[in-house]
Image (cartoon, rainbow, N blue to C red):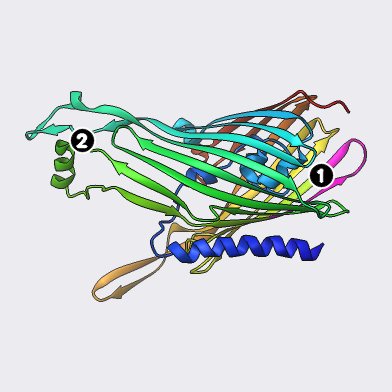
Amino acid sequence: MLHHTKLVLALLSILLFAGTNLYAQSAPKYSNEFLSIGVGARAFGMSNSVIASVEDVTAGYWNPSALVKQQDKIQLSFMHSALFSGIANYDYLGISTKVNDNAALSFSMIRFGVDGIPNTLDLVRNGQIDYNRVTEFSAVDYAFIISYAQKAIKNGLSIGGSAKIINRKAGEFTTAWGFGIDASARYETQNKWIFAAVARDVTTTFNAWKYNFTDAEIQTFQSTGNEVPVNSLEFTLPKLLLGVSKKINFNDDYSLLTELNMDLNTDGRRNTLLQTNLVSGDPHLGVEAGYKDIIFLRGGVGNVQQVKTEDILSTEIIDGKTITNYKSEWTFMPNIGVGLKLKNLSIDYALTDVSNQSAALLSHVFSIRAAVNAPKK
């Protein structure tokens, strides 16, 4: 058991850090971050701690190797959320099917968009301000993901992978196309402990950006001291997600599932609980209490960060300049959610603060999942 698990993790690690070393100097932080938000209200309610316990169509996003745990022939899922109090719309659509008893396939689409952004590039013309020339545009990100899973020879072990195409655009000004690959593994022991590893952007994902500005718009950039964007490549470095989960059935009615995940980013030091110059670790925990496999209550904690406050700790003068040091405190993001499962239909809701800044930016997440042509039991 340990031999096979270690082999899978070793292969994932080799691919992960191969991509890291190749582009460590040129890749920006937080590239394609809309793909890190998550899908499914169940996951949001558990602070995205689901890569080990997921067993439905959303596994195509979270952990492709878990698609083989799907019990239905076909599953459909849709999610909508108005994030940041309606500033951005975030949507997900997924469909999955069992190819046979040992394999499964899924397709996922994600859209993240901000609409009604003012375009002020033509606000000033010949020194004259005219607000009638202010128009609006949308900034929209799309991801199309095809995932496949296969049971391994070793009992309890499955492997999977995803290929994703990314399209990002901001009005008529710019567009980008990208491509990336994810790989994953899942292992379930005889006593129902589940271990999972997911290597996101395992070969390093790239976006090819193309800009389309008029001469007048370029002149506006130059006259206001802004840099004129040029066509370029943007790289997203690999990320390794690790998870462990355990479900306890107290009796025929009550159950409790707990999952702990660790996200390991390889793009340098981030404001996370664990920080190094090479890898930053972001742990998060989720729980799900179930009643008769019909009603679920969920909670989670994640995004642990150290942030500065307005309280002054000390001041000092260095090279004639006054340097103010502020006190800092640890913060975290709590999430809650509920779920209802009625035969082949599941409805989930989560309340989350994805900004981790203010209760005024709380976001509501709704998702629905339906089983089609469910096999007879």
Q: Nearer the viewer, residue 169 or 50?
A: 169
Q: Residues within 10 Å of mark 2 (few under 14, many from 20)?
A: some
Dot 1, crowdedness within 10 Å: few (<14), some or many (≥20)? some
Q: Residue furthest right?
A: 251
Q: Which residues are magenta?
A: 243-256
On the image, the x and y values in percent for residue 265 come to 54, 59
Q: x and y percent of residue 116 in the render? A: 35, 28
Q: Are marks 1 and 2 in contact (CB under 8 Å)?
A: no
Q: Residue at x 89, y 35 (%)?
A: 253
Name the one closer to the observer, 39 or 149: 149
Q: Is residue 103 magenta?
A: no
Mark sitting earlier along the chain (1/2) = 2
Amino acid carrying mark 2 in the image? Leu
Left or right: where does residue 72 sit relative to residue 59?
A: right
Viewer-proximal residue among 172 and 340: 172
In the depicted structure, whether residue 328 falls above or below residue 302: below
Horizontal side of 76 relative to 211 (left or right) equals: right
Q: Which residue is mark 2?
A: 121
Label 1: which secondary element: strand
| Residue at 20% in and 35% down | 121
Task: Name which residue lies at 38% across and 61% down.
Answer: 26
Q: Is residue 86 left or right of residue 173?
A: right
Q: Which residue is mark 1?
A: 256
Q: How many numbered badges does the structure rendering display?
A: 2
Frontmost of labels 1 and 2 is 2
Q: Name which quarter of the figure residue 124 lies in.
A: top left
For residue 295, above or below residue 2: above
- Amino acid at dot 1: Leu
Q: Looking at the figure, which quarter contains the N terminus?
A: bottom right
